[in-house]
Image: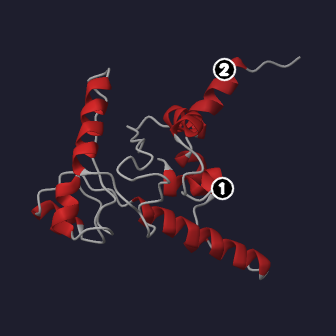
Amino acid sequence: MVGFNRIPIDAYPDLDLTHFGEERTGFYDIIAASSLPVMIDADDCYDQQAPKRCGHLKGKQLVSVNAMVSKIRAALAARSESEFFIIARTDAIEVYILDEALRHDGGHIPWVSPNELYKMGFSMILYLTIILFRVTYAIEQAVRDLIGGKQLSLKDSVNFQTYEDIVGLSPWKEIEKKFHHED
């Protein structure tokens, strides 16, 4: 999770203002908060020439295919754990046509359904902005409702118990009970 999807966390646009080193503390926080596997997009748009831009923004200039292949090889050589895997992706779709973008280094493409991408041979597909945009819309709607004096609708939200379940509060409550003492 870096770049465009970290804008709500960092409050900076993805325009080469922050880099992996500045963001890595946030990665550790995400890893600590979840028992799920975590994928971190640690590329900082290494397929682009500086200054890099979010892959969703226009005006990118890309490094050569040979330069990108060298960077992928270096990442593979630096891998120290077998569970650590490298995913090559590209911001080339805006700069090149689809075939050239896929040849460039592996695959950011405009909206195509998961079924169509599977038929094209993709085994892993990320739709990160769909979730980000949906959450952003929900937050904006909630703020509009608050400003308008509207009460929270249960059909548009989770209840408190569901929220506690989502954030995993129960095990922590048990730990608190076990070790809490009155003075």
Q: Residue at x 30, y 60 (%)?
A: 108
Q: Position of residue 167 (x, y in %)?
A: 57, 44
Amino acid type, residue under disc 1 in the picture: Ala
At label 1, counting other C-alpha atoms closer than 10 Å, the crowd grade (few under 14, some 14-19, many 20 or more) is few
Q: Is residue 148 above or below residue 169?
A: below
Q: Secondary structure at mark 1?
A: loop
- Which residue sits furthest bottom? 148
Q: Position of 174 compared to 180: left or right?
A: left
Q: Position of residue 21 (x, y in %)?
A: 55, 34
Q: Is residue 23 above or below residue 53?
A: above
Q: Residue at x 53, y 48 (%)?
A: 166
Q: Position of residue 126 (x, y in %)?
A: 33, 56
- Which residue sits furthest right? 183
Q: Which residue is mark 1?
A: 11
Q: Position of 129 compared to 123: left or right?
A: right
Q: Which residue is mark 2?
A: 178
Q: For residue 116, which quarter of the picture?
A: bottom left
Q: Residue at x 31, y 68 (%)?
A: 95
Q: Can residue 151 be seen in this snapshot?
A: no
At label 2, counting other C-alpha atoms closer than 10 Å, the crowd grade (few under 14, some 14-19, many 20 or more) is few
Amino acid type, residue under disc 2 in the picture: Lys
Q: Residue at x 78, y 78 (%)?
A: 147
Q: For residue 170, which quarter of the picture?
A: top right
Q: Is residue 142 above or below residue 21?
A: below
Q: Secondary structure at mark 2?
A: helix
Q: Position of 17 compared to 66: left or right?
A: right
Q: Can residue 83 be seen in this snapshot?
A: yes
